[in-house]
Image (cartoon, grey):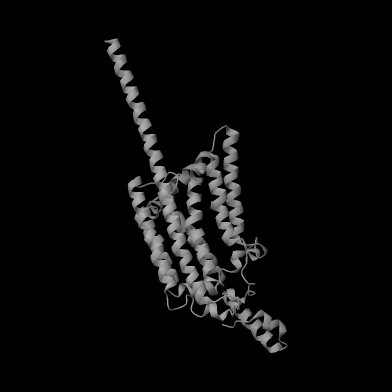
């Protein structure tokens, strides 16, 4: 594959090099493989670049706007009908949920996700762990069931309770997918392939989101799902996920080979060292994974305690009703 330095290209007067690069790019486009390295080399990473390199023309940006619009329309329908919808759920879904996805895909970070492994790991963390958690806490399925007409509501219920949904949302299956996928991506040639092809790179983003949703929705989500485990089992599974990111992060930090092969060195970035950046990437995955896992374990414990309190109040009400019926029967006797 031909890699052309934009600075050298601008200062060179050799038309043959331009012709060769143009011919190579045309051949790759015709073959359906558009290499990400063909894009302009990004400027040195900075906070300013996160804003100046933002992109709003991607399919993911359209999907985020559409999802936010549908969610707000559902909330509006409930209010018009006189029903209440917790504002915390709306904030969770739109803020750290959809907003978290936008912060690492639509913002200027997208310009660096194939130039810096550390930026890619930030995307990994947000798309697979942070955003799916808050999407689940937003309870979009419950909102849809309360606002959809009868026929679409029945179809949605059929999907939620389908055999495929039962398999993928089963906690052990979801846990296996969540743990195995990063190793299958980073320790095979698949990662290099996603760096070279735009469509594969975008598909990885969507895959991260779906993997996180499949794992966290049955554990922390508020939507009705079949086969949901009791809270002790969920807490145990969440606890088991903590060392996974430690192992993966340390493995990346101590690796003697560069992820993606010669991809990062071939970019010729004078302001970044691929080896040092890979160590930073592993540290992000290690520290960030442990922090998110422990935090979500605390959230699960809080949900567990609230559930126990609601169950205790329900039992108290039932005992009060039984006692009232017993007194009424004694008075009648």
* Vertical position of residue 240 compared to residue 82: above or below: below
Q: Is residue 34 visible?
A: no
Give the x, y percent position of residue 11: 72, 84
Give the x, y percent position of residue 149: 53, 40
Give the x, y percent position of residue 302: 41, 43
Locate residue 123 relative to residue 185 in the image: left or right.
right
Q: Residue at x 52, y 43 (%)?
A: 144
Q: Please state, as top left, top right, bottom left or bottom right, where the N terminus lies in the image.
A: bottom right
Q: Residue at x 67, y 79 (%)?
A: 6
Q: Residue at x 38, y 43 (%)?
A: 304
Which image quadrant is residue 18 in? bottom right
Nearer the observer, 23 or 264 = 264
Q: Please state, as top left, top right, bottom left or bottom right, where the C terminus lies in the image.
A: top left
Nearer the observer, 151 or 304 = 304
- Tally the marks: 0
* Vertical position of residue 102 compared to residue 144: above or below: below
* Vertical position of residue 116 compared to residue 142: above or below: below
Give the x, y percent position of residue 135: 51, 50
Q: Is residue 195 visible?
A: yes
Q: Residue at x 51, y 39 (%)?
A: 146
Locate residue 180 relative to residue 150 in the image: left or right.
left
């Amino acid at each position: 594959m031909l890699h052309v330095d934009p600075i050298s290209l601008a200062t060179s007067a050799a038309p043959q090099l331009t012709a060769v690069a143009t011919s190579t790019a045309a051949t790759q486009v015709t073959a359906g493989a558009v290499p990400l390295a063909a894009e302009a080399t990004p400027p040195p990473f900075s906070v300013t670049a996160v804003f100046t390199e933002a992109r709003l023309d991607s399919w993911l940006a359209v999907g985020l706007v559409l999802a936010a619009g549908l969610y707000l329309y559902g909330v509006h329908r409930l209010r018009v009908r006189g029903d209440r919808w917790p504002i915390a759920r709306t904030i969770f879904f739109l803020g750290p949920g959809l907003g978290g996805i936008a912060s690492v895909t639509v913002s200027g970070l997208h310009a660096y996700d194939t130039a810096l492994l550390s930026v890619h790991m930030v995307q990994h963390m947000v798309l697979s762990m942070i955003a799916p958690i808050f999407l689940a806490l937003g309870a979009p399925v419950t909102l849809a069931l309360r606002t959809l007409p009868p026929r679409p509501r029945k179809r949605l219920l059929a999907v939620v309770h389908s055999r495929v949904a039962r398999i993928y949302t089963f906690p052990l299956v979801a846990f296996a997918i969540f743990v195995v996928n990063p190793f299958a991506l980073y320790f095979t040639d698949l990662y290099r392939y996603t760096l070279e092809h735009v469509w594969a790179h975008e598909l990885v983003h969507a895959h991260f989101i779906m993997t996180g949703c499949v794992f966290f929705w049955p554990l922390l989500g508020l939507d009705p799902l079949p086969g949901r485990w009791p809270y002790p089992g969920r807490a145990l599974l969440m606890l088991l996920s903590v060392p996974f990111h430690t192992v993966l992060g340390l493995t990346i930090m101590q690796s003697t080979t560069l992820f993606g092969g010669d991809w990062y060195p071939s970019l010729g970035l004078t302001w970044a060292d691929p080896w040092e950046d890979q160590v930073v990437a592993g540290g992000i995955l290690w520290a960030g994974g442990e922090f998110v896992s422990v935090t979500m374990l605390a959230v699960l414990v809080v949900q567990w305690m609230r559930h126990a309190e609601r169950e205790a109040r329900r039992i108290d009400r039932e005992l009060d009703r039984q006692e009232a019926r017993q007194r009424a029967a004694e008075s009648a006797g």
